[in-house]
Structures are given as structure tokens and as C-alpha cells.
Amino acid sequence: MMIRSLVAIAATFIVAAAVAQSDSLARFYSASITEKELNAHLSVLASDEYQGRDTGKEGQKMAAAYLKEHFQAMGIPPVPDPYAEQITEGYFQPYELVEEHVGGLSLASGADVLELGKGLVYFNLALTAGMEVRELVYLGSSATLPVGLDLAGKAVLLNGADLGSGEAAMGSLRQRVEQVRKGKPRLILVSTPKLADFAAFMHGGTRMRLADGETKSNGTPTGQLVLVDESAMNGVLGKTSMRKLVRKKPGRVVPVALDVRVAPKEERVFAENVLAYIEGTDLKEEVIVITAHYDHIGVEKGVVYNGADDDGSGTVALLEIADAFAQAKAAGHGPRRSVLIMPVSGEEKGLLGSRFYSDHPVFPLAGTVANLNIDMIGRVDSAHMKSEPYVYIIGSDRLSTELHTVNEAANKDVGLMLDYAFNAEDDPNRFYYRSDHYNFARKGVPCIFYFSGVHEDYHQPGDDIEKIRFDLLHQRTLLVFRTAWELANRAARIVVDKPMK
């Protein structure tokens, strides 16, 4: 009995010593992450020279080359066999896109023709052929579908007068449309008196989708979404105006004479995800994936949208995290599990790069332990102008209780205020579904989305490096590194103990 007790005590001391050593090493290598280096990288990637890093364009290619060059300089080797089948130049996962030049969809009602920017707005072209619409199923303004209502293949009309404005309006629209699409309608019309507010979210004259056909309309195979100006919608409805319809119960069928015309204008382009793979030791078949999107909006009307925060901040954080892990490995302190640092492209086009990876993973998703995703961690939002240093944590407890616990423990040495406001399942902004981590979450991989919130320069040309808070960017980067270090080195893989929702 005494021998067993001594063995147990010895084992406890060994485990405690191992944990203490891991913590000490994490602190040591985290010191290589500096504000100076974050600033140096961002000064390049968020400069006008990189032309806003638009997916498939020269600026994005330049950024991919910059990332590869620095991963090589860190001593991170090319992706090894047998995983290199999808990889070019040792570091790139290329994927093909269909670039749609918008303007290929119009609605004709009698002599009136509604076109993009002239009575209607749409974000992606999901229809491959036109359709005649002779009746609309009116659904009101609720996100809940009437029980037993058959919408399959039909055209539906939503009242969008109460959607609000700005980011909140987009969040409400997404939530409402997601519910309606469950009924598999072919066309979703949303009548709104504030069409200009939604038009503001359209950037450039093109939209993109993955060429392999696995996703259209931001990953939803049914339901072409078209927002229509309320006055124009009244013209389509004829004697039945929106004002009269709002008093009717959802499910009412409204006769119309509407022709949906589709003339796709498309070309093929290629983009790349960049992979820096740091092979683990005894648990190398298990992988921690750390992502951020390095693409942005590009150039519009001669103005460069540099995207210093969105998501230059996340991209340079990846470079520093990769360097810290590379230094540890070179010194013989490499991670037990493998770590994949993956800047992805195509996020601004509908999470396309991460979608492609999650559908065509280089490393099996069954062995993917977690995804830590960074998207905008360089500034302060209006809710935290006078608060202590913070970061929003989104998704940490959605699939794994342990992931949430690991991240909170990692923060003890970092000292950020962890704000879970956007982690609520009823968050109207729907941020959990709006960055690259979601493409891992939908496959059952636990994830954390690190985010500092929306600011006045979101998707505007003013998102420049001069406005980045490098002290906060540095602190937030440390948290991601410390969480990744723990996930990569702990004895047991975190457990998925919650169902997907």
C-alpha cells in the first residue's frame, strides 16, 4: 500500500513538473512576439503596394509570396509527404474560383426592369437560369416559418422594413434568410425601404464562388436572395401593396407577373491558402490549426482599401505565432501535436478559402483538435473606449467545454478581459457564423474566434495602420499563442462534448 502511494505521489510530481516546464517554455518563446515585429510586417502587408489584397488579384498573390518567404526564413519546411498532394511550391493550397461580374440578374415586371443598384441589390448569383414567377408566398417579417407551409422551389417575399440599419441589419437579415432557406425556396425577395443601407455592404463589381460547385450563394445551395426597394416592390405587387400585406397572415399567396432574368458574366480565377506546418513529436498526427484571412477588399475607384485591422492584424499575428513555434522546435522544444499556421484567402468573398480547406483538408479533420481563428484584433470598438484591455471570445464553449477552460487558463498570464457578448447564441450580429472558424465548426472541430469588434473604418478605406493599437494587438496575439501552446502540449486531446447547432 505504501509503495502504491509513493508511486502515485511521484507521478503527481512528474506531471506537475512537466506542466511547470511547459508553462516556463511558453513564457520564454512568447517573448519572441513583439510589437516591433508586428508593426514591421503590417507596414508591408497593409501598404498601398499590396493593393488591398483582393482575392485572386495581384495584391493577394504578393501577400501570399510574402508569407511564404517569411515562413521559409523562420526555418519552417514545406508541407511534407504524404500531405503535399494538394500543395504547390511547398506552402500553397490553390483553389479555383468563379468570379461573377455582378449585374447578371434583373427582375422584369411589365415595362419596369429592376437591376443592380436600380431598385435591387443582391450579393451572390445562385440562380443559373431565369424563372417566371406568377405567385409569391408572403412570409411577413418573422424568422419562423409557418408550420406545414411548403416552400420548396417557390418564390417567397419577406417584409424587411424592421431590419434596422448597419451591421445589425445585416445580422438580422442573415438570421431571417437562414431560417427561410430551410424551406428550400428557389427565390427569396426582401422588400426594404432602406435599400441603400444594404447596398453599402457591396464592394467592387464582382462576386466569387468556389468553382468545384460545393458552395454557391455563400455556401447555401438554395434560395437566391434579392433585396428590393419597397416602392419598386409595390410596383411589382400592383394592387396589393406592402402596406396592405403587412396586415395579412404569413403564408398568403400573392399573384404577380414577374420574370427573373439571369445572364451570368463569369471568369475563372485562382487563389491560395498558405500553409506553414510545424510537425509535432509524439502526438504529431493530431493538429492544431490557427487561421486568419490575409485577403481584403482591394481597390475601388482608385482608392486602396488596405485592411490593416481586417485582417492584416490577424495575419501578422500568425507570422509572429509561427516564428515562436519555429524557434521552439529549432531548440528542441517543439510541440507534441503538430501546429498548422494557415493564412487563408477568400474570406471577404464568403469564407471561401477556409471553406475549400474544410472540404478538402490537407490534414485529416478527424485529427484536427481545434481551430483558433483571428479576425480583427488591432483596434478598439465603441463599447470599450474606456475599458481595460479586452478581446471578444466567440465560440469557445460551443463544441468543447475544455477548449473554453484552456483559453481562460491561458489568459491568466496575459491578463485580458475576455468579453463573451458576441458568443450568445441569439447574437443578432451572428459573428459566430461570419469568419473562417465556422467552416471548421460546421465539421465538428472546436474553435475560438478572437475579435476586437467593429469600428467606424470597417470595410472602409480608413482602415489603415496608423489606427492600430499595437500594444493591444501584441497582448491579444500572446493569448492565441499561449492557448495554442497548451492545446499542442497537454497530455490529453480536448474532448468534444457538445452537439453542433
Image: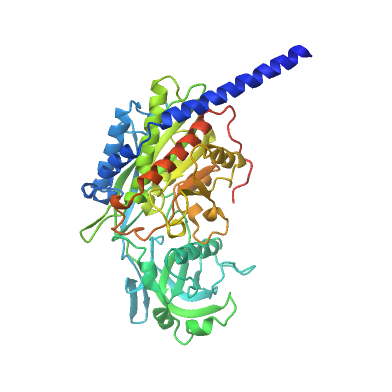
Horizontally, residue 39 falls left or right of residue 159, namely: left
Q: Position of residue 233 (x, y in %)?
A: 42, 79
Q: Which quadrant: the N terminus?
A: top right
Looking at the picture, tell me which residue is in the foreground, 53 or 147.
Answer: 53
Q: Is residue 81 visible?
A: no
Q: Residue at x 31, y 55 (%)?
A: 463
Horizontally, residue 6 falls left or right of residue 381, namely: right
Q: Position of residue 85 (x, y in %)?
A: 38, 31
In the rendered image of this protein, does residue 432 appear above or below residue 333?
below
In the rendered image of this protein, does residue 160 appear above or below residue 26?
below
Examine the image and state in which quarter residue 386 appears. Answer: bottom left
> Which residue ends up furthest to the bottom in the rendered image?
239
Give the tally of numbered discs. 0
Specify the color scheme. Answer: rainbow
Q: Residue at x 51, y 26 (%)?
A: 22
Looking at the picture, tell me which residue is in the foreground, 312 or 36.
Answer: 36
Looking at the picture, tell me which residue is in the foreground, 194 or 247.
Answer: 194
Q: Position of residue 366 (x, y in %)?
A: 54, 35
Q: Is residue 327 visible?
A: yes
> Which residue ends up furthest to the right in the rendered image?
1
Q: Position of residue 342 (x, y in %)?
A: 39, 38
Examine the image and state in which quarter residue 278 appears. Answer: top left
In the rendered image of this protein, does residue 77 appear above or below residue 430?
above
Horizontally, residue 263 falls left or right of residue 404, namely: left
